[in-house]
């Protein structure tokens, strides 16, 4: 400890550890309400020491939103997202998105709370909307193919799918009793077939 | 205006109008971040004048959460919520809850954001959980009756239903193109039968 007392640091954090802790603090208190002092406290370092690690909370938000969005966008680069009937592509994307949610629950929680209060947040919202549009387009195509029920507007269908998947971050915990693979299976099963018995 | 200038008020607000505007401000800025000064500004009255109308922002939050919860709990008092097979009761409660969401979208949005930061918020959370438990119990009963798919844990099924319904407040707008009755129909149709064609 003595060798670190010069900058007030009691821990050797790498950027990844700092980012994970920061995202938890943002989610707990809200990004706007979080100060660098609060982040330093959560890290157990002094307010001056945190600037040795990160330049600003905006920097951490950018890293966190990029992480979440890059993971979601990577789904669309997979050949399975662009191969075969629209309903199969839709199943693949929904299942994979649920997988990203359970794997990156705190980062996706942060992304879903972004309201567009800065240029950075507006850019993240635009990327999130572009991802959602890809899913909406698959819903429209699958409906035109006759694979999605015709009695509901495709926008409503897409929104209900987003809502169901997005809500997983509210209850899924990596150390909880429900396996992430099973969650993804369940989401696709309920989304496609509903909760009623066959 | 002259007769009102003594207390700085330019409007004759009743408590209902004030409540509606306050809930919108809470939803826009977050309840914690909202001050009585911000509420006064949204109402177009002075900070001292607002205290002629309401004693505190806590008072407004209590009114708003009571409104949302009373409307949800009233669903369970309807005979249809306790008559017939569990799957029918579940359908009635889901459909009615969606109706309350679309009818009271800003109040339910506020309720869904409550995190338990005060005794009042914790009490609201407890009432919300009790309402959700009633739905979860219906899911369990309907699953035991063979009407709900047996391959998914009833807690997961209930959570996906809550998630899909709750997300309606994120996109439904009373002045938007989608009729509230149709939204309730669509939610029940997708929840029970999924998005795939029969």
Image (cartoon, coloured by chain):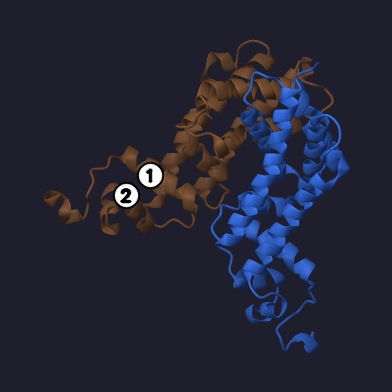
Chain colours: A blue, B brown
Q: Residue A196 location in percent, x, y? A: 75, 19
Decide: is B178 above or below A163: above
Instruction: Please identify the residue farthest to the left as the structure is shown.
Output: B2
Secondary structure at badge 1 equals helix
Whether pointer 2 and pointer 1 mark residues with C-beta atoms closer than 8 Å, the reply is yes
- Residue A127: give its label: none
Disc 2: which residue: B43
First in sequence: mark 2 or mark 1? 1
Q: Residue B43 location in percent, x, y? A: 32, 49
In this rendering, do the residues under marks 2 and 1 share a single chain?
yes
Left or right: residue A44 compared with residue B71: right
Tell me which residue sits at (66%, 20%) in the image: B189
- Observer-nearest of A191 and A81: A81
Other-residue count near label 2 (Cα within 10 Å), few / some / many at <14 / 14–19 / ≥20:
some
Tell me which residue sits at (73%, 81%) in the image: A9
Disc 1: which residue: B21
- Observer-nearest of B99 and A157: A157
Q: Residue A40 location in percent, x, y? A: 66, 73
Q: Is residue B31 visible?
A: no
Subunit of label 2: B
For the residues marked 2 and 1, what is the alpha-carbon distance in whole angstroms?
7 Å
Tell me which residue sits at (57%, 49%) in the image: B116
Subunit of label 1: B
Secondary structure at badge 2 equals helix
């Amino acid at each position: 400890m003595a060798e670190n007392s010069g900058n007030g640091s009691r821990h050797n954090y790498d950027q990844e550890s700092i980012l994970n802790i920061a995202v938890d603090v943002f989610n707990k208190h809200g990004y706007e309400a979080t100060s660098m002092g609060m982040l330093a406290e959560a890290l157990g370092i002094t307010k001056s020491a945190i600037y040795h690690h990160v330049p600003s909370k905006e920097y951490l938000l950018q890293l966190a939103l990029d992480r979440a969005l890059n993971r979601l966008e990577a789904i669309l680069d997979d050949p399975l997202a662009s191969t075969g009937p629209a309903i199969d592509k839709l199943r693949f994307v929904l299942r994979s998105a649920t997988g990203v949610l359970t794997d990156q629950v705190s980062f996706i929680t942060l992304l879903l709370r972004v309201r567009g209060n800065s240029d950075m947040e507006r850019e993240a919202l635009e990327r999130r909307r572009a991802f959602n549009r890809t899913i909406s387009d698959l819903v429209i195509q699958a409906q035109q193919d006759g694979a999605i029920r015709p009695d509901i507007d495709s926008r409503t269908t897409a929104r209900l799918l987003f809502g169901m998947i997005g809500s997983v971050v509210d209850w899924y915990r990596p150390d909880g009793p429900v396996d992430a693979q099973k969650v993804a299976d369940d989401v696709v099963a309920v989304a496609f077939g509903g909760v009623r018995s066959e």
